[in-house]
Amino acid sequence: NLMITKFNHVAIVVPDLNAAKKKYKEVLGAKVSEISNYAEHGVSVVFVELENTKIELMHPYGNKSPIKKFLENNKNGSIHHICIEVKDIKKSVEKLKKNRIKILGDETPKKGAHNKPVIFLHPKDFYGTLIELEQE
Ligand code: CO
C-alpha cells in the first residue's frame, strides 16, 4: 500500500544560475555540479549534493521553458517543487486518479531530468506545493 518512499530533491528557481551556484558553494560550503542544460525540459540545472538528498537550482532554458512564467512571477526566485520517489509510478497514477488528484499534462509518466518516469501533481490538491513523483 506504500506509495511514496524516499525524498529525492527540492527544486528552486533562481534568477541567476551562476550567482546561485557561487553562493551555495562559497557561502554555504556546498558541493555543487556544473550547469547542465536540458533543452527537452526547458531548464538549466545546478545540482547541490548533500549527504542525504539534493537541491536542484533551476533557471529557464530557451523561450518555451515551463518555468519562465514562474520566474516572472517570482523575480527573486522561489521553491518550485519537491520530488518524492514512488515504488510503482503506474500504480500511483491509477490510485491518484481514483482519488481525483489532478496530474499535470496528459497524466502519463514522462522521462524526467534523471531519465526516470515522473509525473507532477497539481499544487491545488497538495496544500500549495507542486509535487513531482519519480519512479524509484
Ligand atoms: Co524535479
Image (cartoon, helix red, strand yellow):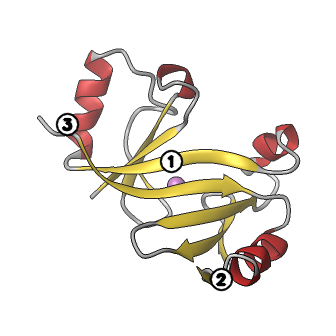
Residue 36 lies left or right of residue 65; in this view the side is: left
Sequence order check, earlier mark of 1 and 2: 2
Residue matched to label 3:
91
Secondary structure of the residue carrying tag 3 is: helix
Residue 93 lies left or right of residue 31; in this view the side is: left
Q: Quadrant of the N terminus?
A: top left
Mark 2: C-beta under 8 Å from nearest atom of ligand 1: no
Residue matched to label 1:
82
Q: Quadrant of the C terminus?
A: bottom left
Q: Position of residue 59 (x, y in %)?
A: 75, 60
Secondary structure of the residue carrying tag 2 is: loop
Q: Residues within 10 Å of mark 1 (few under 14, many from 20)?
A: some
For residue 29, the mark is 2
Residue 10 appearing in the image = yes
Q: Nearer the viewer, mark 1 or mark 3?
A: 1
Quarter where residue 109 is shown: top left
Q: Nearer the viewer, residue 42 or 14?
A: 14
Secondary structure of the residue carrying tag 1 is: strand
Q: Position of residue 39 (x, y in %)?
A: 66, 65
In space, the residues marked 1 and 3 are separated at their CA atoms by 20 Å
Query: Label 3 sits on what residue type?
Result: Lys
- Tell me whether circle 2 and circle 3 mark residues in contact (CB < 8 Å): no
